[in-house]
Image (spheres, rainbow, N blue to C red):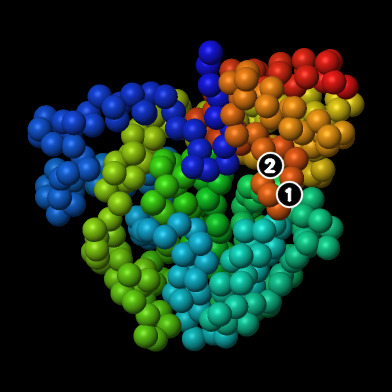
Amino acid sequence: MTIYNFGAGPAVLPREVLLEAQAELLDFRGCGMSIMEISHRGSLFQNLYEEIESDFRMLLSIPSTYRVLFMQGGATAQFAIVPINLLRGKRQADYVVTGEWGQKAVSEAARFCTVRYAADMQPSGFDDVPDVIETDPSSAYLHYTSNETIRGIEFKAIPEAQGLPLVCDMSSNILSRPVDITRFGLVYAGAQKNIGPSGLTLVVVREDLMGEVLPQQSRLFDYRQVASQKSMLNTPPTFAIYMAGLVFRWLKRQGGLVAMQCLNERKAKKLYDYIDSSSLYVCRVKARARSCMNVAFYLRDELLNSRFLSDAEKAGLMQLRGHKLAGGMRASIYNAMPEEGVDALVAFMTEFERLNG
């Protein structure tokens, strides 16, 4: 039986990538050692690092005026590290909140500055993206979350920052489609959804925004210091970086981000179209804001939830339980989820509805 992993993160990795890692786990490029055993200071890893950064830059068309940082601590650490670096003498930052991760970013930023809500979708129950975002020119930057994993809310277009540096938590939809990096001052993303295993965070930051950290902060939180040492102020997560590199190479073989966008939109459409046609399932997110990465849905009869999850696991469809804050079900269909997995889920849901609807 084929197993399909719909977990939100740590999430499914491409099978080809796992097989590549398995094949060279004990002997990386003929050195007789595992990638986990070699020094990050040695030429073997340094050369690998340069290859990986180059591939990442190519996939996202990152200009030379931006630095790429490989950091630790996940997106949660960046909730604090962003204001530490980007306030630059200002006392206020603007935030757009479309879900729980945006709220968490606000909570951390509020430790360092006054947070002003440029838009807040909580009153509507986090079911849409805002029509209007109102910024304050005295703010240091505008922050938003491009894809909220818990309820499946995604911005389909990049918001207008109205002159402020635009900052984006892109953890759960980075590399799922092309984006114009030049529209952003800073992008950050935890790796464990579309990039690789947990433990690595990618940061893309415009050079002119670095170098004015809040006083008495660790050098590890200073983007300029991290950049000056090529992300090696301390020992980086070498295995996670290596795995990210394999994923970047896999993405290139798939045809890059344009090809991934076509595939991701097709997968999501199949699932949403079935849900919308069903009398048993419902999606509570407005159509224009529905995520291509995390499809959150509910059974109209929630007494069937346990049976649905149990039967799904017997069919090889794993980790479909929704987040505890939202309930219901959630199918995360990141880049590495093959279209066959979505087809299998739709077929299962159809049969489950026939038997229980």
Q: Mark 2 highlights which residue?
A: 322
| Disc 1 secondary structure class | loop
Callout 2 crowding tier (Cα within 10 Å): few <14, some 14–19, many ≥20: many
213 is higher (above) or lower (below) than 30: below
Out of 339 and 90, give the one closest to the viewer. 339
Quarter-wise, where is residue 352 in the image?
top right
The quadrant the C terminus occupies is top right
Q: 311 and 251: which one is in front?
A: 311
Which x, y percent locates residue 49? Answer: 25, 47
In the picture provided, is 338 more to the left or to the right than 314?
left
Where does the image place residue 266, in percent across and percent down from the top left? Answer: 65, 26
Where in the figure is residue 99, as x and y percent of width and height? 69, 57
* Residue identified by numbered label 1: 326
Q: Say whether marks 2 and 1 touch (CB < 8 Å).
A: yes
Mark 1 is on which residue type?
Ala
- Which class describes the residues within 10 Å of circle 1: few (<14), some (14-19), or many (20+)? some
